[in-house]
Image (cartoon, rainbow, N blue to C red):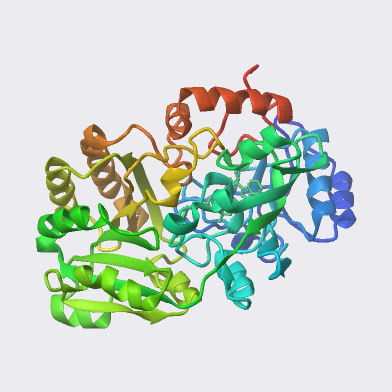
Amino acid sequence: MPDRRVINVMGTVLAEETVRAFGESLHGELIRPSDEGYDRARRIWNGMIDRYPAMIVFCKNVDDVIESVYFARVHDLLVAVRSGGHNVAGTSVCNGGMVIDLSRMKEIEVNPAFCTARAQAGLNWGELDRATQFYGLATTGGIVSRTGIAGLTLGGGIGWLMRKFGVTCDNLLSVNVVTADGRLLTARAEENQELFWGVRGGGGNFGIVTEFEYRLHKVGLVLAGTVYHPAVKAREILRFYRDYIADIPDELTTMFAYIASSPTPFLHRFFHGSPVIAIHVCYTGRIEVGEKVVKPLRVFGPPIEDAVRIMHYTELQSMLDSGSPAGLQNYWKSSHLMSLSDEAIELLSAHAADITSPLSQVHLQHLEGAVGRVGEDEMAFSHRDALCVLNIVTRWEDPKEAEEHMRWTRDFEVAMRSFSTGGVYVNFLGEEGEDRVKAAYGRAKYNRLATLKNKYDPTNFFRLNQNIKPASL
Ligand SMILES: Cc1cc2nc3c(=O)[nH]c(=O)nc-3n(C[C@H](O)[C@H](O)[C@H](O)COP(=O)(O)OP(=O)(O)OC[C@H]3O[C@@H](n4cnc5c(N)ncnc54)[C@H](O)[C@@H]3O)c2cc1C
């Protein structure tokens, strides 16, 4: 029989009556161990994370969020905040304590005249894209449709539209935030400016965002998809890719991927499951121009499969979903690269060739364009001068294989350090310690964030995240 007791950080057991009364006060639902659905409710996308919260509050509205914050504060409970549940580090679920879950808060209002959308935090990118594409509009979002808009936006948000329209938080106009003392604040350029600066990249450190307001852009059909090459040609393809992306327009965003086993039926027949190189593309702009821009990529090699075509933006946004199923063991290492030298290409190719799991991938996401044109100090999101994000996405099924796959990932990341800027994208971090969180922002920005944390969360109530410690602690 699972332990239904709620025990606070001081070791005190809360009275059953107190917990029950809290549950009854909610508009949403409180799930506790042994309740039906508890096991599903405590799970997140990364199957490696296996935690047992004492209370999971499925909030229905902002009142529920505020009530949960009050209750957790008064009773000294550990708190995790969850929206899409996609964070690889698993910070959105805790052992004991309370998970404040916003995934049922899914209202969205699109204003086509002003090209804006107000979206509640529980939406994922598939849901937001569907609502905005109804009007032929979109904003930069994640490349897997089930990822939550909340965690992604608060960390920055890199995706197919970023080189044209900036990262997701560049398109953020305002947020509604429940702070650690239970106040509901709005932060935008003209109001609570410093808080607005911090939530655009600083993650969930400053409060629970209940609603995001985004700037939208006209996005119609896109020229998108993937060209595939055999992995044995990794070095040659990477050198071509480096030279190609050096001179492409903002309308084109690309991603290089080393995929451990062939992902399409055609490639599978051809390669019997052995590794392939994929170059994914999204051209948003006039299709005739896009055809010319993308042509060199479709000719070079030539590719063994060319799956680039005109498609709806929402189709592109779910194109990679099947390659990222929930429940697998996931261990990622990421860093920013300033350039792709021949030495870096050699090392990357050699390590990728030793890939240990057929489910793993290595990604290079090309930045620059509009991402690099926003001033580094404009918001907490950092490292805009990098060429690309390297992400070693290691996945496997059997937990017993963890050591082998994690060792390969760590060795790979260490080997690539000499080519890294030293920076990292906060949303791709695992539980890697304070120094890596500092690396996500750099020293000066981290200090500014710590001062802001002091103002809005001096006791570090919101600490299950890529944590910025209040300057006074
Ligand atoms: C398959 C996959 C694909 C991805 N693709 C991309 C991509 O294309 N681009 C990209 O930039 N990133 C991508 N990511 C990383 C993603 O941005 C982060 O994992 C992000 O945290 C996910 O947001 P979530 O709401 O789903 O996370 P959750 O796990 O629910 O939350 C993660 C953390 O965010 C904070 N948080 C969540 N909700 C709130 C809230 N409402 N208010 C305040 N804080 C909150 C909390 O600190 C929480 O611990 C991807 C991740 C996965 C697993």
Residue 206 seen from this side: yes
Residue visible at 85% across and 41% down in the picture: 15
* Front-most of residues 312 and 437: 312
Q: Nearer the viewer, residue 289 or 240?
A: 289
Above-or-below relation of 433 to 294: above
Q: Residue at x 89, y 50 (%)?
A: 21
Tell me: 65 left or right of 430.
right
Does the rendering let one see residue 355? no
> Viewed as shown, does residue 424 lie left or right of 415?
right
Relative horizontal placement of residue 332, taking residue 139 as reference (left or right): left
| Placement of 470 over or under 400, stated as above or below | above
Q: The C terminus appears in which quarter of the rendering?
A: top right
Horizontal and vertical percent for residue 77?
73, 37
How many discs appear? 0
Q: Is residue 335 above or below residue 136?
A: above
Can you give x and y, in whole percent of width and height, for residue 399 in the image?
A: 37, 54
x 19%, y 69%: residue: 296
The quadrant holding residue 69 is top right
Residue 444 location (% of width, % of height): 50, 23
Q: Nearer the viewer, residue 39 or 73?
A: 73
Q: Quadrant of the N terminus?
A: bottom right
Tell me the quarter of the picture where residue 359 sits.
bottom left
In this view, the residue in front, 457 or 464, is 457
* Residue at the extreme top of the image, as rendered: 472
The percent position of residue 470, horizontal first and vertical second, equals: 63, 23
Question: Which residue sits at x=14%, y=75%?
Answer: 271
In the rendered image, the vertical position of residue 15 relative to residue 460, given as above or below: below
